[in-house]
Image: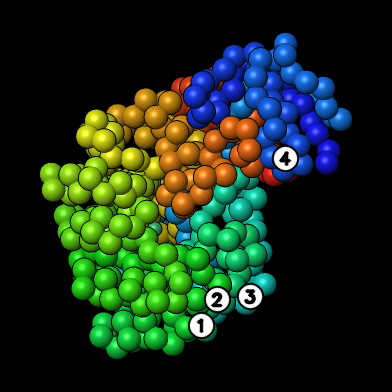
Amino acid sequence: MTSTVITNIGELTTHDEQPVRHDAAIVIEGATIAWVGEATRAPSADHHVDLAGRAVIPGFVDSHSHLVFAGDRSAEFEARMTGTPYGAGGIRTTVAATRAATDEQLTSHVARLVREMRHQGTTSLEIKSGYGLTTRDEARSLAIARQFTEDTTFLGAHVVPADTDPATYVDLVTGAMLEAAAPYATWIDVFCERGAFDADQARQILRAGAAHGLKGRLHANQLGLGPGVQLACELGLVAVDHCTFLDDADISALADSGTIATLLPGVEFSTRQPYPDARDLLDRGVTVAIASDCNPGSCYTSSMPFCLAVAVRDMGMSPAEALWSATAGGAAALGRSDVGSLRVGDRADLAVLEAPSFVHLAYRPGVPLVTQTWLGGRPVL
Ligand SMILES: [Zn+2]
């Protein structure tokens, strides 16, 4: 097995018992971290990489994205930002374009976005379906997503398509569509929000998914208060995403259940909505993850460093808390223990920063600080 020693790491964040080290080194054997410690005590290896004082962090784990789509909605964004009424159909525009696209077009678009993510230090990601909304288009969206990650999520319950009624559509999502999607999916998700799916429908859809071996997640409490967060906690889901509007009982339920609150700062940024209060969640013992929610409608950023900077600036998180949430927090939200940290035995997924400290991710927003991304022990950039 080939080994590589990386030395002269100015600041190394591992999330182990000594979370941040200075003048550090790591040894990678194959795809795995084999040794972590002071640079002066580093063992020798087949290959040697000198980072000249740069900081190293675990690769970002983006636990929430919607990358399988076609079409462009920049006009809708422009209208939203300029206060001009916009007539086109939002998500329906994307659904129509996605259905019309070929497999090759969809695949190369996902590949481009994943490449974009790699350039910004993301090493693990989740990808949802949800812009097909027919049995054929949901299944092929997931088959395409599967080429890029094992963490694929069936989100047939994104919105009820215009040409059908809710009861008929829930039957489809829990029936033939689920049957066709399940072979390509690890997770099942529901947009549990007023105007989308209610708590009873969400429960029914998640239960049907579980019967096909799919683990549940939820989009909840994005646009207002609602039952989604407490449903996620009651069902013991690993994570519930958005959590923008929470009341006291929601926060207590999150703290008591251990269900992770995945916050998506890019959404509030891109829609000019109020941010979730991450500070309050952390102070009350809730585990917080940060993800991009990269999608063509409410948030078209693929940048975890950007989301981290917004979380620090506008959600009351410290740089260290935001980094944890965007790496180890994201891993926890996907039920992964081998990524999101750089302990001995973890997968050697890491990002090298053109900076002396990870704090620069928030201190220098919008600057492309990731100079190398390593995936399974090899640089991919
Ligand atoms: Zn989403």
Ligand 1 falls in which quarter?
bottom left
| Marks 2 and 1 close (CB-CB < 8 Å) | yes
Is the residue marked by circle 4 packed among few (<14), some (14-19), or many (20+) residues within 10 Å?
many
Task: Report the residue marked by disc 2.
Answer: 183
Is the residue marked by circle 1 packed among few (<14), some (14-19), or many (20+) residues within 10 Å?
some
Chain-order first, disc 2 or disc 3:
3
- What number is the disc on residue 377? 4
Is the residue marked by circle 2 packed among few (<14), some (14-19), or many (20+) residues within 10 Å?
some
- What number is the disc on residue 180? 1
Q: Secondary structure at mark 4?
A: loop
| Marks 4 and 2 close (CB-CB < 8 Å) | no
Expressed as whole percent of the image width and height from the top left, the position of residue 176 reads 44, 87
Q: CA distance from mark 3 to mark 4?
A: 31 Å
| Marks 4 and 1 close (CB-CB < 8 Å) | no
Q: Is residue 35 left or right of residue 259?
A: right
Task: Report the residue marked by disc 3.
Answer: 103
Q: CA distance from mark 4 to mark 2?
A: 29 Å
Chain-order first, disc 1 or disc 3:
3
Q: CA distance from mark 2 to mark 1?
A: 7 Å
Amino acid under disc 2: Pro
The residue under the point 28% across, 76% down is 204
Chain-order first, disc 4 or disc 2:
2
Amino acid under disc 4: Gly
Is residue 76 visible from the viewing direction of this image? no
Expressed as whole percent of the image width and height from the top left, the position of residue 89 reads 35, 71
| Marks 2 and 3 close (CB-CB < 8 Å) | no
Nearest the eye: 43 or 331: 43
Q: Is residue 218 left or right of residue 334?
A: left
Chain-order first, disc 4 or disc 1:
1
Expressed as whole percent of the image width and height from the top left, the position of residue 194 reads 20, 66
The residue lying furthest to the right in this view is 46
